[in-house]
Amino acid sequence: MKIIAVGGYEAVGRNMTGVSVGKETVALDNGIRLDTLQMYDREISMLQAKKPEYLARMDVLPRADRLKDVVAQVISHGHLDHIGGLPFNRPRAPIISTPYTVEMGKREYRGGDFSSIGYGEVSEVSSNFSVELVEVTHSIPYSSFVVLHTPEGDVVYASDFRFDNNSIIARTDYKRLRELGRGNVKALIVESTRSRVNGKTPSEALVRQELKDVMEFIDSGLIIATTFSTHIERIQSILDEVVKVGRIPLIVGRSLVKNIELARRFGLLELPSNAKLLATPKAIKAALAELGDRDKYFLLVTGHQGEPDSVLSKMTDGRFQVKLQKNDSVLFCTDIIPTPLNYATRHVLETKLKSFGVNIFEGIHVSGHASREDHRHLLKLLKPDHIIPCHGSMDMRSDYLVLAAEEGYEVNNQIHLLMNGTEIDL
Ligand SMILES: [Zn+2]
């Protein structure tokens, strides 16, 4: 068996790993790297015309052509750093994921040969591979651990996850993980972005509590909140609080509306009856022109990282119907994704917000990624023979190596640090 590191092994983003048995390979994830993308172009659509080799050289895409004889492309979940490479790399092999993630994939890559499987089902790919998806909690619905059953043992691909036992939309299948651990897990390929952070990543329940506290505290002015458009559980928590304080929610922005509609189709999100979804510039203009008493409204918008073309940035630049006023409040229900560019754009946005006299509430957020004790727990559940940390820079993966060594794994014999473009024979 060979594990091939394609992307995501030197920095966060553009995740892709290959697993080869005999002459066949299964590709795991096919993502883009957003921060390098932003440096070149703001709109992903503008890059459609560019060749994948060119985008790989820009550190935006993984070098998918490194994988030969691919019999299946499996996608773990719908975040762009795991799925966003599909329309550029255009894999011809069947693309396997959960029904929800397949719907997200189809939006990006129309010509793809998608095939969905539910949790607990096994899809036979060939005599060397069958694919199983195991439910796990993360920050987007229907995230999976990918299990490849092969004649040489199982490979578990765990990127991304956190263990949230109080999630309202997902449940980690500990029972199945324990069963796999009693079998033969030959290799665990595991994300490492927060392997330095002590303890356990807190539950989304903590955000619900904080939101309640902040929303009850604000007694007047327009309230505007921003969060990840794919984070359905967070959006539900926000809308629940809006209902409790008796405001009218207006949800503004194409990506938010798109993801909310998908989640509703899957029964994952309940929209308040008085909520308005505003996706087109025309609908936004009409609804916002009528905005009367600011104390009655609540806006959920895009733009948490200060992206220049987002709704929130447009509001601060006067390019939007609603003008900000003193005593309005902005809630950042995210953290800053730690890249220099994001720090810069967020700084610009916050400076502009303050110039209007807007009150800023930030850090209403918990991470979607596993911390050190979550990782230790996973190792105890799965008991893998080999560990390959992925999805992280060298120092993040080194932190994982230290943790695995603490658990008795031998460095280099059992824990392997690969770089993009390298592979290991197990
Ligand atoms: Zn993710």
Image (cartoon, grey):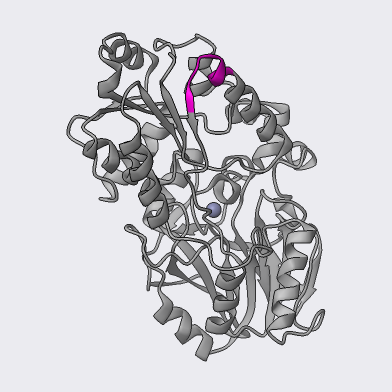
- Identify whether 49 is placed above or below 79: above
Pick the residue in front: 178 or 126: 178
The answer to whether residue 47 shows anywhere in this view is yes
Quarter containing the C terminus: bottom right
| Left or right of residue 62: residue 285 | left
The answer to whether residue 23 shows anywhere in this view is no
- Identify whether 374 is placed above or below 357: below
Pick the residue in front: 287 or 204: 204
Quarter of the rendering containing residue 355: top right
| Left or right of residue 301: residue 125 | right
State yes or no: residue 358 in magenta: yes
Q: Position of residue 129 (x, y in %)?
A: 55, 75
Q: Please give the name of the residue rendered at 44% of the width and 15% of the height, measured from the top-left corner.
A: 326
State yes or no: residue 132 in magenta: no
Quarter containing the N terminus: bottom right
Query: How many marks overall?
Result: 0
Q: Please give the name of the residue rendered at 44% of the width and 66% of the height, measured from the top-left corner.
A: 136
Q: Position of residue 339 (x, y in %)?
A: 70, 40
Quarter of the rendering containing residue 280: top left
The residue segment tinted magenta is 352-359
Quarter of the rendering containing residue 21: bottom right
- Identify whether 354 is placed above or below 182: above
Q: Position of residue 13 (x, y in %)?
A: 66, 49
Q: Please give the name of the residue rendered at 47% of the width and 44% of the height, measured from the top-left corner.
A: 364
Q: Position of residue 379 (x, y in %)?
A: 59, 79
Pick the residue in front: 136 or 166: 166
| Left or right of residue 365: residue 421 | right
